[in-house]
Image (cartoon, rainbow, N blue to C red):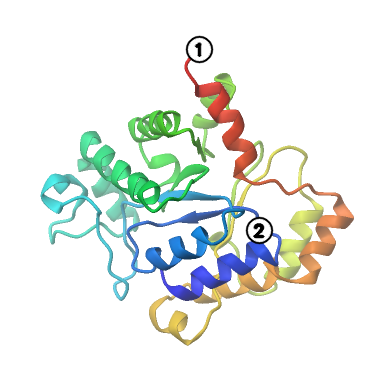
């Protein structure tokens, strides 16, 4: 969304314990993010499929011409906000064909930049928000050789029946955590981590002056960044013998399971 996020994400992967990241293609700092990723082919990243916009001071819209995806726009001709009412309105009127147009535009923009993503996931719409949108995304993943983040039921159960790996345990979104004492809670959650495949969605940013000007969520992002890059985080992983993988592992299994036989 803005450069301080890009910088913090790269550092959290290269110097911290983060392993994969997600790219929001319609956002204004996406070109810079793609340039950073192009110089770091070792960093796995997914496409954070984006149909909503929550920051008035950071405008973005669909990559597809608006007249071709009118059902994805609010009465003012902009993307809906990710409020409960905004999401409900979007999901109530979005035509699947227009969702596909925009999803393909975002995926193809990454391919046109010479980048190779590992997976697809969703911005503020868990599992796409609708069964048919999730089904569409799984179809696109098969076409492009990618995995999909699926973390709600019954989607997880459906994917497992197809031999596709998804998180075994509760998915963590860092925006659900209190800021006070977050580092200690993160460390304890790692110590208490259940066996199996776990996924945490964290949102690092440098929390600099620019961040504080445009993003009300900057304290969440700054505290995420501080923990991810801390010696404490790495020490807990070593003490608990937690194996951190990335989406390349998941992508490989998805690609093998979804390929035509």
In the picture shown, does residue 209 fall above or below 35? below
Residue 14 appears at what percent x and percent y? 66, 64
In the image, residue 261 lies at what x, y percent?
Answer: 50, 12
Residue 166 visible here: no
Q: Is residue 231 left or right of residue 150?
A: right
Q: Which mark is residue 102?
A: none
Secondary structure beneath disc 1?
Answer: loop
Q: Which residue is mark 2?
A: 18
Q: Identify the image quadrant of the N terminus.
A: bottom left
Residue 217 pos. (x, y %): 47, 72
Q: Are marks 2 and 1 in contact (CB under 8 Å)?
A: no
| Residue at the (46%, 83%) spot, across then down | 212
Residue in view at x 67 percent, y 44 percent: 198
Mark 2 or mark 1, earlier in chain: 2
* Residue at the limit of the structure toward the top, as seen here: 261
Height in image: 119 above or below 234? Answer: above
In depth, the one of 79 and 114 nearer the eye is 114
Label 2, secondary structure: give it.
loop
- Which label belongs to residue 261? 1
Report x, y in % for residue 51: 31, 51
Q: Residue at x 55, y 20 (%)?
A: 162
| Residue 61: quadrant of the picture | bottom left
């Amino acid at each position: 969304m803005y450069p301080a996020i890009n910088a913090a994400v790269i550092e959290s992967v290269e110097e911290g314990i983060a392993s994969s990241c997600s790219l929001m293609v319609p956002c204004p700092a996406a070109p810079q993010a793609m340039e950073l990723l192009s110089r770091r082919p070792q960093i796995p990243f997914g496409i954070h499929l984006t149909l909503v916009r929550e920051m008035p001071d950071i405008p973005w819209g669909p990559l597809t011409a608006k007249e071709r995806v009118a059902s994805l726009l609010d009465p003012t001709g902009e993307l809906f906000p990710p409020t409960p009412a905004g999401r409900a309105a979007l999901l109530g009127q979005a035509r699947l064909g227009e969702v596909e147009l925009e999803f393909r535009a975002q995926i193809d923009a990454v391919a046109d930049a010479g980048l190779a993503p590992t997976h697809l996931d969703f911005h503020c719409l868990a599992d796409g928000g609708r069964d048919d949108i999730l089904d569409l995304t799984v179809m696109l993943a098969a076409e492009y050789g990618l995995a999909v983040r699926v973390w709600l039921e019954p989607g997880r159960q459906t994917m497992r029946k197809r031999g596709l790996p998804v998180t075994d345990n509760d998915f963590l979104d860092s925006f659900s955590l209190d800021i006070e004492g977050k580092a200690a809670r993160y460390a304890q959650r790692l110590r208490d981590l259940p066996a199996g495949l776990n996924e945490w969605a964290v949102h690092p940013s440098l929390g600099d002056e620019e961040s504080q000007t445009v993003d009300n969520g900057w304290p969440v992002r700054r505290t995420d960044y501080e923990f991810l890059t801390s010696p404490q985080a790495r020490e807990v992983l070593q003490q608990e013998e937690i194996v951190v993988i990335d989406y390349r592992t998941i992508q490989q299994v998805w690609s093998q399971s979804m390929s035509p036989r």
